[in-house]
Image (spheres, rainbow, N blue to C red):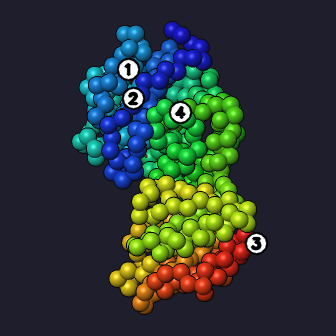
Amino acid sequence: MDMSVESIVKVGVEDRIIDLFEGMYKVPDGVTYNSYAVIGEKIAVIDSVDAHFSGEWLDNIENALGGKRPDYLIVQHMEPDHSGSVDAFVKKYPDAVVVGNSKTMVMLGEYFGAGFPQNILTVKDGETLDLGGRVLKFIFAPMVHWPEVMFTYDELSSTLFSADAFGSFGIDKEGWDDEARRYYIGIVGKYGVQVTAVLKKVSTLKIETVAPLHGQTLSGASLAHAIELYSKWAGYQPETEGVLVAYSSVYGHTKVAAELLYNELILRGVEVKIMDLARDDWAECVAQAFKYSKLVVATTTYNAAIFPAAREFIDRLVERNYKNRTVAFIENGTWAPVCAKLMRTQFEACKDITFAQTTVKIHSALSDESKAQVVALAEELSQQ
Ligand code: FEO
């Protein structure tokens, strides 16, 4: 039996046919469902894959193990992108033991039927599993991003199997930050307190490699960079001092105002990004709002309310505990504009939001007066 550090084999699959991850996130570059065979005198497979790929995953295991049979299937996370093939595994390897915690076992019964599976090992936080020549330790990570989630630490290779944490969308993507940010903010962003807690919990471990359930494994400088970003994301701290200008525009007049603000900020040396809330990917808009320290929402009043693309954008920020940012508004309305006031009310559900003193009020199209307000807003945002 190979007892080297290299005796961790990737047996996961690539999903290039999925349209929407979790039924809502666009993944134009696909997504991986990672799975790992950890080989000691006994063999543990860590997590299964989406049910559409059961056959390919079982073939990967068989090929990786050269005819040997796994002794354990460790279930770190029950969301079906990872647990969807547990039943296929049990059918092929009925003597293998399924390892999870008490919450895992309840969910397995819910997904696959009461009493499933029969061969189980229920572990507690901090317990270990001796594979012979290497010992795996289970570290519970509740709400990262479901309550049953646990990490697995392999001391021999200093590898932390981190479930959804440190995961990213995409296959063969250059870089990690953008698709990891979109994944984290979208899917785990609400649970920053819990992510911070588990980062603290594992900080005493010697970790050379982090092996998540989506995307690339991380080590060396990439891992140090990822941990730095994760600490900011989990702490709701901006990555970048700068402004996201997020607009929606029915006939183009609000867009003109947003672009004027963008240009005025550029002139003042401010780092700025502009996005169209009705046309750009909503999850990327949300992720960029978390990236920057300041946000300007420019939109119109519609049905005596906020234009839907902007209202939904703010809803998604509020759901994810958006905080510690400066927020400003540009409102447009030909008659009875009320959206700036309504947007402010939406953001009042967030903690530690500083509202800019300047609100731009446009009646139909930019005027000299509203242009001056845009310039004043650019000046204010460049000073903070
Ligand atoms: Fe990748 Fe929470 O599942």
79, above or below 317, in the image: above
- Separation (CA) of disc 1 from disc 4: 18 Å
- Separation (CA) of disc 4 from disc 3: 39 Å
Q: Where is residue 279 shown, x and y percent of the image?
A: 41, 60
- SS at circle 4: loop
Question: In this view of the protein, can residue 174 be seen by the observer?
Answer: yes
Q: Are marks 3 and 1 in contact (CB under 8 Å)?
A: no
> Tag on residue 216?
4
Q: Residues within 10 Å of mark 3 (few under 14, many from 20)?
A: few
- SS at circle 2: strand
Q: Amino acid at mark 2?
A: Val
Q: Where is residue 123 shown, x and y percent of the image?
A: 47, 37
- SS at circle 3: helix
Q: Residue at x 55, y 74 (%)?
A: 257
Question: In this view of the protein, can residue 315 be seen by the observer?
Answer: no
The first of marks 4 and 2 along the sequence is 2
The first of marks 3 and 1 along the sequence is 1
Residue sticking out furthest to the front: 368
Q: Amino acid at mark 3?
A: Gln
Residue tagged by mark 1?
60
Numbered disc in front, either 1 or 4: 4
- Separation (CA) of disc 2 from disc 3: 49 Å
101, above or below 358, in the image: above
Q: Are marks 1 and 2 in contact (CB under 8 Å)?
A: yes
Residue tagged by mark 3?
383
The first of marks 1 and 4 along the sequence is 1
Q: Residue at x 56, y 67 (%)?
A: 259
